[in-house]
């Protein structure tokens, strides 16, 4: 067995107050925009997982100075001395993105409007993921690419060609890549978004001083960015990642007698779909002390064990919770009744084919699942714990690993995860945090 194999169990209710790592999406963007500002950007609460560290390393390779302050400072305190829009330099070696699709796609956008040639590499999982959704529109702006999967080499163009583009799929990564390319492109970059996606890029671009206009219409959202921008350095606090909070949150819902508080969670409306869906299923989740931090809505969550009931998840909520579906499937498998999900084709091209992997794993631990091209139908166990021992293959996917680890808290048999290593990409303190609430690791 892999030395990194593990399982979690719960000898009793989960209790305690916790904070989760900083939001991964916001952390990536804070580093990138800080690298394009002139002066020092100060960031607190930055996620120090492998994905974000890959972004920092790539930006350093292109001239930005990114450092932690002296030892003794709080975790997540970082400083970025930017080079200005248009000031990125030619990297001397390939940019290793590890497992991070966000780093890869957004950095391609940054480079597309610079006179830079860069080679992107990644791990086995990332090398299987499609990049055409980004390379195709960036090619319209003048960038050239050697292929559509890693490893690939791209060459940017200065001045790049202004683009007006309608997103064919709901993808915040594609939208963000095009906006980043537009920063160093003369004229206006215009993006039509029929289905709104997470808007961290728009909020942060405006915060850094970019001239960006958003128009809501009956056909969706239109974002217009004025190019050749001058970005101002900022002082930023990164809220807790709602995608990471999803794991202890669902754990508390499914372990009888549990009650936990998760502090400082980002509740951007484009990211809060999971809470809406779980509340519709009967979850007791209370939002306490709502506030705004760094332009993002934030609150503390009080979560109590709750009997859940299956529902049909509205497809329009998928973009607001796309990364949380694996852990939602765990909750649904323990609910009373049937949960139907559709519109989830995007899950087939994440770190793994999450629909296929979740269906296989849930079936192995005793759930009844029907897999469809765009979703799963899950026949819940009405609160009865999982009752089959199984070893789950993660396929290098951090969310698969954590989802089935949480499932082990509501199982009479061991659910073993084959590899803990992928968890470090987004949630490096997952184990001590879960143990602080009362879970046990084997």
Image: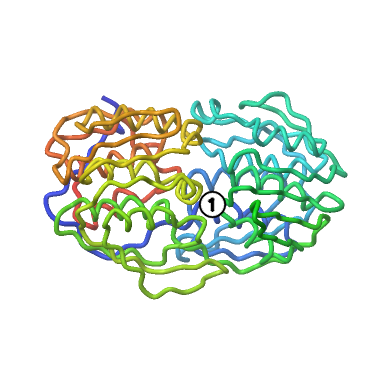
User: Residue 279 in the image: x percent, y percent?
Assistant: 32, 58
State the SS at label 1: helix
Q: Give the residue at the far front of this rendering.
A: 218
- Left or right: 406 as drawn, with respect to 79: left
Q: Is residue 309 above or below residue 80?
A: above
Task: Rate crowding at label 1 as few (under 14), some (14 to 19) or many (20 or more) other CA atoms within 10 Å.
Answer: many
Q: Is residue 67 above or below residue 9?
A: below
- Could you say which is closer to the camera, residue 10 or residue 201? 201
Residue tagged 1:
25
- Could you say which is closer to the camera, residue 87 or residue 202? 202
Q: How is the image coloured?
A: rainbow
- Could you say which is closer to the camera, residue 63 or residue 146? 146
- Left or right: 157 as drawn, with respect to 170: right
Residue located 18% across and 52% down the image: 255
Q: Is residue 149 above or below residue 106?
A: above
Name the quadrant of the N terminus.
top left
- Could you say which is closer to the camera, residue 67 or residue 334? 334
User: Residue 184 in the image: x percent, y percent?
Assistant: 80, 51
Residue located 60% across and 44% down the image: 173
Residue located 39% across and 43% down the image: 325
User: Residue 52 in the image: x percent, y percent?
Assistant: 53, 48
């Amino acid at each position: 067995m892999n030395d990194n194999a593990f399982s979690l169990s719960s000898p009793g209710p989960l209790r305690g107050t916790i904070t989760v790592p900083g939001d991964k999406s916001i952390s990536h963007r804070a580093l990138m925009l800080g690298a394009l500002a002139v002066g020092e950007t100060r960031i607190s609460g930055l996620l120090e997982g492998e994905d974000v560290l890959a972004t920092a390393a790539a930006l350093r390779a292109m001239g930005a100075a990114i450092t932690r302050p002296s030892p003794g400072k709080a975790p997540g305190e970082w400083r970025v001395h930017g080079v200005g829009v248009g000031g990125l330099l030619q990297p001397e070696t390939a940019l290793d993105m590890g497992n991070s699709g966000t780093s890869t796609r957004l950095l391609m956008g940054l480079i597309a409007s610079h006179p830079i040639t860069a080679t992107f590499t990644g791990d086995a999982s990332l090398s299987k993921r499609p990049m055409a959704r980004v390379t195709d529109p960036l090619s319209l702006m003048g960038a050239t690419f050697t292929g559509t999967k890693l490893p690939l080499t791209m060459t940017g163009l200065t001045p790049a060609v202004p683009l007006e583009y309608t997103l064919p799929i709901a993808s915040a990564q594609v939208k963000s890549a095009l906006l980043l390319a537009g920063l160093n492109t003369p004229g206006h970059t215009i993006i039509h978004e029929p289905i709104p996606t997470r808007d961290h890029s728009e909020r942060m671009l405006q915060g850094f001083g970019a001239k960006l206009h958003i128009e809501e219409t009956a056909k969706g959202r239109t974002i217009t960015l004025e190019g050749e921008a001058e970005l101002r350095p900022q002082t930023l606090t990164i809220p807790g990642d709602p995608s990471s909070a999803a794991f202890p949150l669902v754990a508390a819902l499914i372990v009888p007698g549990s009650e936990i508080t998760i502090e400082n969670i980002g509740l951007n409306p484009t990211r809060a779909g999971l809470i809406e869906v779980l509340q519709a299923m009967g979850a007791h989740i209370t939002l306490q002390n709502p506030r705004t931090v760094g332009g993002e809505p934030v609150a503390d969550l009080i979560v109590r064990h709750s009997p859940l009931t299956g529902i049909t998840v509205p497809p329009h909520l998928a973009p607001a919770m796309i990364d949380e579906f694996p852990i939602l499937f765990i909750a649904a498998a323990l609910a009373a009744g049937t949960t139907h999900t559709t519109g989830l084709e995007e899950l087939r091209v994440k770190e793994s084919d999450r629909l296929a992997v979740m269906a296989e794993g849930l079936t192995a631990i005793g759930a009844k699942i029907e897999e469809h091209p765009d979703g799963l139908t899950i026949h819940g166990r009405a609160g009865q714990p999982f009752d089959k021992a199984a070893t789950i293959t993660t396929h290098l996917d951090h969310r698969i690993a954590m989802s089935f680890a949480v499932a082990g808290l509501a199982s009479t048999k061991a659910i073993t995860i084959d590899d803990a290593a992928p968890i470090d990409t987004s949630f490096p303190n997952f184990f001590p945090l879960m143990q602080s609430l009362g879970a046990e690791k084997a």
